[in-house]
Image: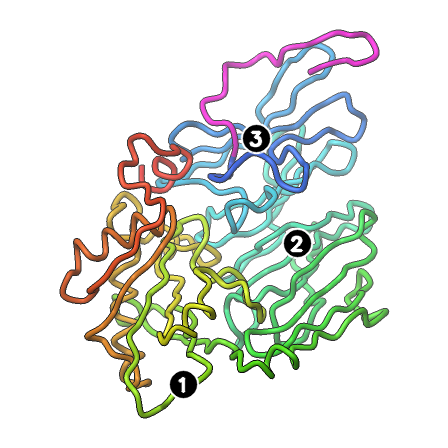
Amino acid sequence: IFDIDNSAATQVRMDPLEAMNTSCCGLMIDTLWKDVRWGNDSEQVFFTRSVRSYDTLQLYAADTDNGEARLIVEEHSKTFVEANGRSGGIPNWRVINRNSEVVWWSERDGWGHLYLFDAVTGELKNRITEGPWMVLDLLHVDDTGRWAYFTGVGREEGRDIYNRHLYRAALDGGRVELLSPEDADHEIWVSPSGRYFIDQFGDFESAPTTVLRNSSGGILLGLQEGDFSELLATGWNFPTHFVATGRDGVTPVHGLLFFPSNFDPNTKYPVVDYIYPGPQVGAVRGRQASVRQGGNAAALAELGFIVFLIDAMGTPARDKAFHDSYYGNMRDNGLPDHIAALRQLARRYPQIDLDHVGIFGHSGGGFSSTDAILSYPDFFKVAVSSAGNHDNRSYDYTWGEKYHG
């Protein structure tokens, strides 16, 4: 800890960190040092500490005068501990109420939820949220009004379980309010005061709408209506969202199909499976209409393919068991779910030619595409591997070791 005015340095008094950060993909996001935050009076600095195995996450406070550190909260898992529903999201903890309380995110009950701890004693005060759904991103905490504002997934029945909605929950528990009622995916930006939210919402098959909301969810101003008319006039198609069942014949898995603009329903088409296995993210990189889906899928379809993307078992933004489904078995890569889903889709879409299925991926997807053609050569006939991390002994330990032990 550096005192700029006095040109002095104080070392935090604890053992060296075994692991640098909670995310597998870097320390910085939006210019913030994600896992370190100042207390409101700058007399304390708060930070999380991971162990090399990533099965433990600890929250510490350090005194800026003498560097004395104390443990506040400790989280354990039999597999790995996350600090957000998406690795790479800002960690879901905030120190509030003049450094006396901590809002903390945990998957301890099998779903990602918020808890309120005493920041002095480390005791759990109460749950803030609960149920078979997930808090995704903690956006703002109003410790005067006693509200936590966040995005969540899977709470609204009959909707796409991955669609984000804006909520607020009473810090003392027992009350959750939906602030973005539209049946769509909501991408949210919060103002520094927490009084206003920019909400861009839409789905895979429509242009997005952007509005300004107040802290009660009311729409104050329409900001923009998306217009895809010129793009659609070129022949570009929206992707088709599908739900299939995974390898077990029970668990729902979601994905996208991309068809060429000159699609002929009387023709058989070869398939390209664009794979990214996670576990930190899936292959579907957003729930709103965009030309930027993974693997340049729309452009690849124009070459005469049906392009397939799926968030298989082992990817995030679901329950902990789904995310953990092949922990310790790195060669699984969700491939059994890919095969199961494609076979089901071929019954719905007879234009899918299962005798001509290729697979393509980058990085972990490159590793997976090579695995696919070696493990399932009767199903996958061609594989393209871009920058595959084929020998994980020399790869990033925050991916291989964290997610596979």
Up-down relation of residue 299 to residue 128 (above or below): below
Relative to 273, residue 182 above or below: below
Mark 3 vs mark 1: in front: 1
Q: Amino acid at mark 3?
A: Thr
Picture coordinates of residue 331 (x, y %)? 24, 48
Where's residue 230, x and y in %?
A: 65, 79
- Residue at the spot of label 1: 263
The numbered disc on residue 48 is 3
Please report the bounds of the magenta region as a residue range: 1-21
The residue positioned 57% from the left and 30% from the top of the image is 48
Of callouts 3 and 2, the N-terminal one: 3
Label placed on residue 60: none
Q: What amino acid is at disc 2?
A: Gly
Pointer 2 residue:
173
6 or 320: which is nearer to us? 6
- Residue at the image position 44 percent from the left and 48 percent from the top: 280
